[in-house]
Image (tube, rainbow, N blue to C red):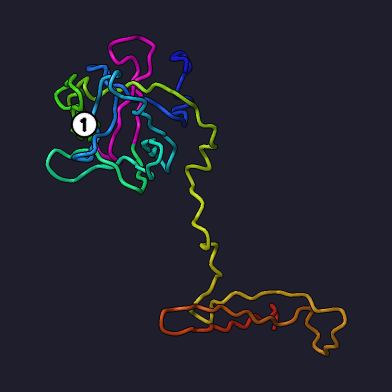
């Protein structure tokens, strides 16, 4: 992909598949298996790996490792000594902030990766250039250059960011029927009379009855709601 193509627009990162390069070591983010954590490797040792899909999620972004034949692997933080960065089958949101002119190539777009709303950001341990140098989270108080990364867009993703920011509920989790436990606050439904109905009532609307069934592991409870027309 052409490096001249801006990856940020109106403050938002372009969704897509990226390589992530540390600007100090010039190595690329990958993952080692034992222990399972993020590390950096020289380009010659990536062996077709080191690809990450970055998509909007809420006010941040998910970062998913792409590897054929593997289940979803999303970047997460490992609590504990060193606050290493690992992967898990569930997604979390990272804050990705643009760093203009990271001190190397004016005009390039660099980023920092932050954990949630904290000031803890991805840090290449010691800025090392060696193979499988680990990443961890470090407070960004001194803005060290080993915490600055270049995103290299390999393939754009044309998803609608607005849709990605509001995930669709799982199947079977449609909207629940409104129900107020307080009978005095229950809403009244207005339903027109059937034209063929012979009803001496002067009201223009008939009473409707709605039922909501709640199923538990032990019993089924049926709640019966009676809605009457306004003005009754």
Answer whether residue 115 is magenta in the image. Answer: yes
Image-based side of 138 in relation to 50, left or right: left
Rendering coords of residue 176 (x, y %): 53, 67
Above or below: residue 32 compared with residue 221? above
213 w.r.t. 114: above or below = below
> Which residue in the protein does label 1 denote?
135
Task: Return the residue nearer the eye: 73 or 169.
Answer: 73
Residue 198 quadrant: bottom right
Q: Is residue 174 magenta?
A: no
Residue found at the far right of this picture: 196
Instruction: Please tell me in which quadrant of the rendered image residue 144 appears.
Output: top left
Residue 205 location in percent, x, y?
Answer: 76, 78
Query: Residue 21's x, y, as percent?
Result: 31, 21
Residue that appears at 35% across and 28% down = 49
> Around disc 1, counting alpha carbons within 10 Å, would you say few (fewer than 14), some (14 to 19), or many (20 or more)?
many
- Residue in view at x 24 percent, y 42 percent: 77
Image label count: 1
Q: Secondary structure at mark 1?
A: strand
Residue located farthest toward the left when viewing the structure as drawn:
81
The magenta segment = 95-118
* Of the pair 142 and 54, the residue shown nearer to us: 54
Residue lying at 81% horizontally and 85% vertically, measured from the top left:
202
Which residue is located at x 30 percent, y 19 percent? 43
Quadrant in the picture for the C terminus: bottom right
Q: Is residue 24 left or right of residue 94?
A: left
């Amino acid at each position: 992909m052409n490096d001249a193509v801006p990856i940020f627009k109106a403050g938002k990162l372009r969704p897509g598949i990226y390589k992530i390069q540390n600007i100090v070591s010039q190595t690329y983010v990958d993952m080692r298996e034992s222990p399972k954590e993020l590390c950096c490797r020289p380009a010659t040792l990536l062996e077709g790996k080191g690809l990450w899909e970055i998509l909007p999620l809420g006010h941040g972004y998910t970062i998913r490792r792409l590897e054929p034949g593997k289940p979803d692997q999303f970047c997460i933080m490992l609590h504990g000594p060193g606050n290493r960065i690992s992967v898990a089958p569930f997604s979390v949101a990272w804050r990705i902030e643009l760093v203009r002119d990271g001190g190397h190539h004016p005009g390039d777009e660099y980023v920092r990766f932050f954990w949630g709303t904290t000031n803890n950001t991805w840090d290449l341990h010691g800025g090392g250039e060696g193979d499988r140098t680990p990443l961890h989270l470090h407070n960004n108080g001194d803005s060290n250059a080993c915490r600055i990364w270049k995103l290299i867009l390999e393939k754009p993703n044309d998803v609608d960011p607005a849709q990605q920011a509001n995930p669709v509920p799982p199947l079977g989790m449609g909207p629940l029927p409104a129900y107020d436990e307080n009978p005095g606050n229950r809403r009244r439904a207005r339903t027109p009379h059937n034209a063929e109905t012979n009803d001496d009532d002067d009201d223009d609307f008939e009473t409707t009855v709605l039922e909501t069934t709640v199923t538990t592991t032990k019993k089924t409870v049926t709640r019966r709601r009676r809605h009457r027309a306004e003005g009754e």
